[in-house]
Amino acid sequence: MPERTRNPAARRAAIQRQLLLDGSVAVETLSREFGVSVATIRRDLTVLDEEGEIRRTHGGAISKAPRGADQAFALREKVDPGAKRAIARKALELFEADQTLFMNDGSTILALARELVATGMPFTVATPGINVATTLAENPEIETYLLGGRVRHRILGTSGDFTERMLRAFNGDVAFIAAEGFSPSQGLTYSYESDAKIARLMMEQSLTTVVLATARKLGQRDRITAIPAEAVDMLVTDCNDAELIDGFSNLGVTVVVADVASADSSNVQAIAANSRF
């Protein structure tokens, strides 16, 4: 019997990782996946609930209920969740252990953070995203730096002079950046200059710049251009529009298309089995 199945602590850690990825779990499903009784899973969920890690529901459990700005962010997370997960999992292929990474904020970046935590691999990450940093902290192998600055309630991120000065202190290997829109003509665009400036600094301070964007964001533009499209090294997306993809490819951007169906059907049990924490 695998260690994570017979060891209650390991099994509960795996349940927490599944909650990080899915937001909810079912008793019957967990019982089948871990090969233990329904009663055992119920005891696990009761312990996690008493420790304040989860919230029990009829037949399973959910992540702690979001409040305040978390609730507004949770609404954005519900848009194209399968695409965001597929993009995040595809982006994992670009990682090498012990790299220094930049990650800005947003629901697609948070999806990447969750996948990164599940790998158990060591990294150094600098981010202005408060919920991104909190998620990364679940993996003790990840050295997480929350870029200090003014907290922006709307996006659960920091910005301003303090944020920018701290960001300039890091020399990144890869910058993973999301935006309001990304088009061949207007590049990476944002509603606010503070977001645009952080994206520009991440590009300047890293060796490789990777944009993560769902099909919904491609071809769109917002008020402020942060980075011209030709300055981006790679785009990871779920978009299958050949004409739009060619627009980026013609500018020298490497386009990697994630398979949403494959990501949705992948087994969370495999992620837990490969985790080292």
Image: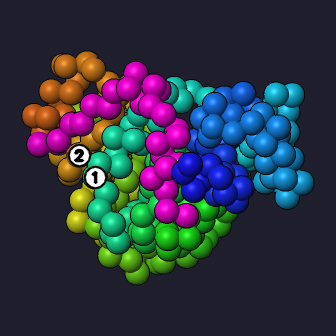
37 or 235, which lies in front? 37
Residue 104 can be seen in this image: no
- State if disc 2 and disc 1 touch (CB < 8 Å): yes
- Of residues 135 and 40, the one nearer the viewer is 40
In this picture, residue 262 sits left or right of residue 74:
left
- In 3D space, how far apart are the residues under numbered discs 1 and 2 (Cα atoms)? 10 Å
| Residue beneath disc 1 | 94
Which mark is drawn over residue 217?
none
Residue type beneath disc 1? Leu
> Quick check: 108 left or right of 203?
right
- On the image, the x and y values in percent for residue 258 come to 32, 31
In-front residue for pair 189/238:
238
Mark nearest the camera among 1 and 2 is 1
- Where 82 falls versus 23 (above or below)? above
Tell me, yes or no, whether the highlighted magenta stretch contains residue 143.
Answer: no
At which x and y percent is residue 92? Answer: 35, 49
Q: Give the range drawn in magenta.
A: 252-277
The residue at the far right in this view is 50
Within 10 Å of disc 2 (Cα), the crowding (few <14, some 14-19, many 20+) is: many
